[in-house]
Image (cartoon, rainbow, N blue to C red):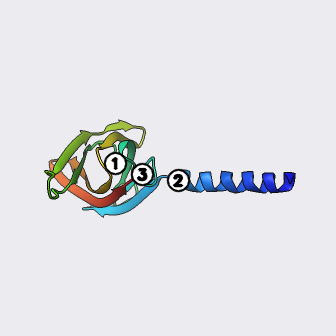
Amino acid sequence: MKRLAVVTMVLLLVAGIAYAKDYEVKKKAGEYNVEVKIDKNPPVVGDNNIEIEIKDASGKYVTDAKVVVEYSMPAMPGMPAMNYKTDTELKGYEYKAKMNLSMSGSWNIAVKITKAGKTSTMKFTVDAK
């Protein structure tokens, strides 16, 4: 019986570690390689912390850009479209922000990177639970 309890605990621990993994997206935005991590996988209704790493073509971290996260859900019958925007704060090599997803469903996310007067955008979709 103790053996079964130990095996069950190990399986729950492994499942918890696997579930705790961040939601990650890696894409190009213009000349930049962008990696986005959301602290919950899947993202949830309510607060979700987002971290963004931006590298130039040579692999060097970009730390002198203005980065804004826009997130939206299109209109549905009986519900208007929802559009939100949040500024990021640079901490080390990462731009950090908090997104508050107000309901479950599919959300469109755009990471807008502005440097030297030029804006590049990375877009992706998440399904909030």
Q: Which mark is residue 52?
A: none
Q: CA distance from mark 1 to mark 2?
A: 25 Å
**What residue do we see at 39% from left, 61% from top?**
26
Q: Which residue is mark 3?
A: 37
Three-letter code, disc 3:
Lys
Residue under pointer 2: 21
Q: Position of residue 25 (x, y in %)?
A: 39, 59
Mark 3 vs mark 2: give the one in front. Answer: 2
Of helix, strand and loop, which one carries label 3?
strand
Q: Earlier in the sequence, mark 3 or mark 2?
A: 2
Picture residue at 43% right of the left edge, 55% below the top: 42
Residue type, numbered disc 1: Val
Compared to residue 4, the image places residue 44 above or below, namely above
**Crowd class of label 2 (few under 14; some 14 to 19; many from 20; radius 10 Å):** some
**As displayed, is residue 39 above or below residue 108?**
above
Mark 1 crowd level (few <14, some 14–19, many ≥20, 10 Å Cα): some
Could you tell whether 11 is left or right of 92 in the image?
A: right
Labels 1, 3: front one? 3
Q: CA distance from mark 3 to mark 2?
A: 10 Å
**Tag nearer the camera, 1 or 2:** 2
Q: Give the labeled residue for mark 1.
A: 62
- Disc 2 residue type (three-letter): Lys
Left or right: 16 in relation to 102: right
Which comes sooner in the sequence, label 1 or label 3? 3
